[in-house]
Image (spheres, rainbow, N blue to C red):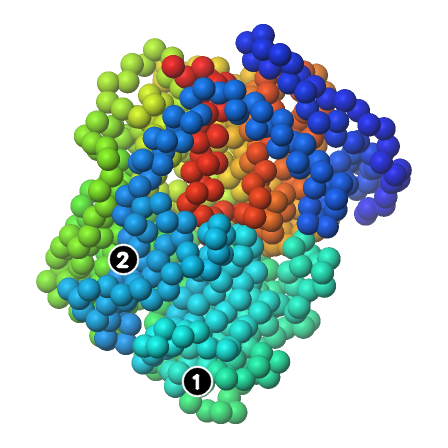
Amino acid sequence: MRRVLSFLCMGAILSTSALCLGGEPALKYPDTKRIDHADVLHGVTVADPYRWLEEDVRVSKEVAAWVEEQQKVTEAFLDKIPQREAIKRRLTELWNYEKFSAPRKVAKRYYVFSKNDGLQNQYVYYRQDRLDAEPRVLIDPNQWSKDGTIALTGLDFSEDGKLAAYSQSEAGSDWSVIRVLDIESGKTLDDEIKWVKFSGMSWSHDGQGIFYSRYPEPTKGEKFQGLSLNQKLYYHRLGTPQSADELVYERPDQPTWSITGGVTDDGKHLVISVGDGTTSRRNRVLVKDLTKAAATPRPIIDDHLSVNSLIDNDGPVFYFKTDDKAPKGRVVAVDSRNPGRDHWKEIIPEGESTLTGANLVGNLFVANYLKDARTQIKMFDASGKFVRDVELPGIGTADGFGGRRADNETFYLHTSFAVPPRIYRYDMAKGESQLFRQSAVKFNPDDYEVKQIFYSSKDGAKVPMFICHKKGVRLDGSNPTLLYAYGGFNISLTPAFSISRLLWMEMGGVFALANIRGGGEYGKAWHHAAIKLNRQKAFDDFIAAAEWLIGQKYTRPDKLAIQGGSNGGLLVGACMTQRPELYGACLPAVGVMDMLRFHKFTAGRYWVDDYGSPENSDEFKALHAYSPYHNLKKGVKYPPTLVTTADTDDRVVPSHSFKFISMLQYCQGGSAPVLARIETRAGHGAGRPTSKIIEEVADQWAFLVKTLKVK
């Protein structure tokens, strides 16, 4: 039950200010207006004095002016940090190295890969007829805008390799436009497909058109903050206007469901995945016979009881990775002629490690597993019999292993915290890896140490954590330490190379990554252990990680910073409101900070499965208990905080951060700076140009140098 108590126009203007660090002149925050607004939710009166900051910055002059004032204060603070420019220069120097993706074979004729020469804002996509041929530019997104804020977000090729469909996104938006490139001529065709979001692209094998998903055209007010409802699957025939596209599948009775589709490698079937509108990705599956013009989609998995990812098919038999009766995942065969669950055939049973994905290459199932957040690759024959383990170059993360059943080779990328990405070619018949490309970064990996430990959380659960630093670190409690985690939506954090983290360690810092509950590191059970009413367990895990680092004398509270983005931004916000004395600095990025209104904007409705719904009375109580915006308290001494967001983020709308920093500045009872860094022409993070990434990281590290007193 909900009713609005009042909405008094703009209320009183209250001044919020705090003293800066070390006896410096007072830091004056903007006089952010507080309004007399409150909602009654399940009998509880909930004040929301910064509701007006939910207005889109591109529409509201008042919000835009507030953003400008916040930026002035933040920039003035950062400008006074003498190490800021040196950090940016070193970061730029380290970032300036060649970066590659693994090659992808197209139409048995040539290979496609992406590469960044070093400081290019966007990766450039190349093609080559043979692996030893000279690469030629296929698509260069850096030509699309002067500031590098138009990015390529998707790419798919026609079966004959003559055409490429690609999607573009501007300023980090989730909205994208699909266009078609004639590969030989290099000309972009006239086709333009709009209002695409959360969609792939898949060619019909005759090369005449593309299957894609879109939403209805939003009104001007809905474009950036409105809920994403009524997704539909269409077929676009080349050379025709989008208005003539064929509607393939919709569910008008279920406006929150997501609908996507892809064509099988044999070209005979369109496999449609229908999600239930939540991030658990439980989905039903339908199949449309593309060999019959009048065929309609037919369900083969007709419920939302499991997460099912298509691997491949043998005619009417479809192979899926599923968590049905297997919390850590298994591979099953579903015969579309008799698809009931009782008739599913198990190919690869559930194992001790978590199955994160699988593919069929060279007539072998290539299965990607996580064991304690580290990659294992196992191969099985078509019947599910174990063939071999892939011997990886070391402990870390391996990604790739794409291809088709007839391919005799595949490629994968391997990386770790102190190992830059390396690309390997894998011979499917011989079972051998050969180094294909490697990045050269101006540092010595042997100077650094990486270890994995397990610590106990509040309830006794054992949680893994990676710790990385220069060799020879003394455990005397004096090390500046950065603790990072995510803990949500079944997403796993694995070892990966990061220039920003490398610089932090080069500066003498310790970096720790905690694989807290809510993620997918140990399968469904690990994920579900920290959702909805149990969400607090993710925060407990993170707090316990901080306490372990302090207890083991890696650091102490005034030298410990915590960082997280998106759901991880929520994590930081919740933990700093619950244990403000435990941290020396906080870096919440693009965070979900208002847990009572997240479901009212853009993709927020998808998150109900992890967070619970404010419309449910029990879940409301849990959400209200940890919502960062609602749990800040007047007069508490909060740690130095730099909130980062972007004005065009249409995934986690920036009002979450706007409202949180306003409340934090109002409540701050200590002298520590609490600031907002608000990026322009940038979204949630995907497609962000290199120049903006470097500038943001440099500002974050400068903030930590200042607040943690890094020498």
Q: Residue at x 28, y 53 (%)?
A: 100
Tell me the amino acid under the disc marked 2: Ala
User: On screen, 83 above or below 72?
Assistant: above
Residue wearing tag 2: 102
**Residue shown at the point (24%, 22%) measured from the top left:** 471
Question: Disc 1 to disc 2, how far (Cα)?
Answer: 28 Å
Residue annotated with mark 1: 208
Residue 394, located in which quarter of the rendered image?
A: top left
* Residue placed furthest toward the top: 23
Give residue 133's position: percent from left, percent from top: 17, 66
Quarter of the rendering occupied by the C terminus? top left
Circle 1: residue type = Gln
The answer to whether residue 487 is above or below residue 452 is below
Task: Say above or below: 185 vs 702.
Answer: below
Q: Residue at x 56, y 17 (%)?
A: 581
Residue 162 seen from this side? yes
x and y percentages locating residue 694 in the rendered image:
42, 38
